[in-house]
Amino acid sequence: MKAEEIETPKVYGYVGWELPEPERTKLLAMFKPTHADVVAHHVTLKAGVSAEYPLPHETHGEVVGVADDGTSVQCVVVSIGGSTDRADGGTYHITWSLDTASGAKAWMSNKLLKGGFTALDRNIPIQLVPKFFPQEPK
C-alpha cells in the first residue's frame, strides 16, 4: 500500500476561542478565582468536531456575567456577537476556577449555567483568538 493511500486518522476536539494571556491577566485581576484550580482558558463554540471544522470569525466578545456554585465551579459568562446563547442551547462562558479535589470538572460549568448567572453592572470587552483544541481519545 502506498503512503498516499493510507488515510490519516481524524483529530477530534472542540472549536472556540482562546483567551489571550493579556486578557486573561486583566480578567484574573477583576474576577478573583474562588476555587483552588484556575482554568480561565477558552470559550467553547462546539465540541466533538474534527480539526477540519471551520473556525469562528469573531475575535471580540464581552464578559457580561458570573456564576459560582459556592463549592466547586466558577465561570464568567461571555457574549459573542451580541448573544450569550450557543447554538447547542448552552451559554458562552469561560470556566474560571474549579475545586478538582472535590471532583469538579470544567464541563460542570454548563450545568451550573442552566440555573442562570449574575449580570455585571457593565460589560467588559475582550479580545478572543479563534482556535481548534484537540482532545485525547477517551
Image (cartoon, grey):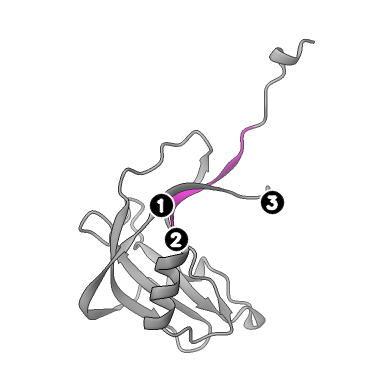
Q: Residues within 10 Å of mark 2 (few under 14, many from 20)?
A: some
User: Pointer 2: what residue?
Assistant: 20
User: Pointer 1: what residue?
Assistant: 129
The answer to whether residue 41 is above or below residue 32 is above
Quadrant of the frame with the N terminus:
top right
**Among the two numbered marks 1 and 3 on one chain, the one whose residue lies closer to the N terminus:** 1
**Spatial CA span between label 1 and label 3:** 26 Å
Label 1: which secondary element: strand
| Direction front: furthest residue | 22
* Magenta-highlighted residues: 10-19
Question: Could you say which quadrant of the image residue 104 lies in?
Answer: bottom right
- Residue type highlighted by circle 3: Lys
Residue at image coords 69%, 14%:
4
The answer to whether residue 41 is above or below residue 132 is below
Front residue of 3/127: it is 127
Dots 1, 3 in contact, CB < 8 A:
no
- Residue type highlighted by circle 1: Val
Label 3: which secondary element: loop
**Spatial CA span between label 3 and label 2:** 28 Å
Q: How crowded is mark 1: few (under 14 residues within 10 Å), some or many (20 or more)?
A: some
Instruction: Please give left or right for residue 117 compared with residue 70 in the image.
Output: left
- Residue type highlighted by circle 2: Pro
**Spatial CA span between label 2 and label 1:** 7 Å
Residue 81: image x %, image y %? Answer: 23, 54
Dots 2, 1 in contact, CB < 8 A:
yes
Label 2: which secondary element: loop
Residue 83: image x %, image y %? Answer: 23, 59
Instruction: Please give left or right for residue 107 compared with residue 27 in the image.
Output: right
User: Pointer 3: what residue?
Assistant: 138
**Among the two numbered marks 2 and 1 on one chain, the one whose residue lies closer to the N terminus:** 2
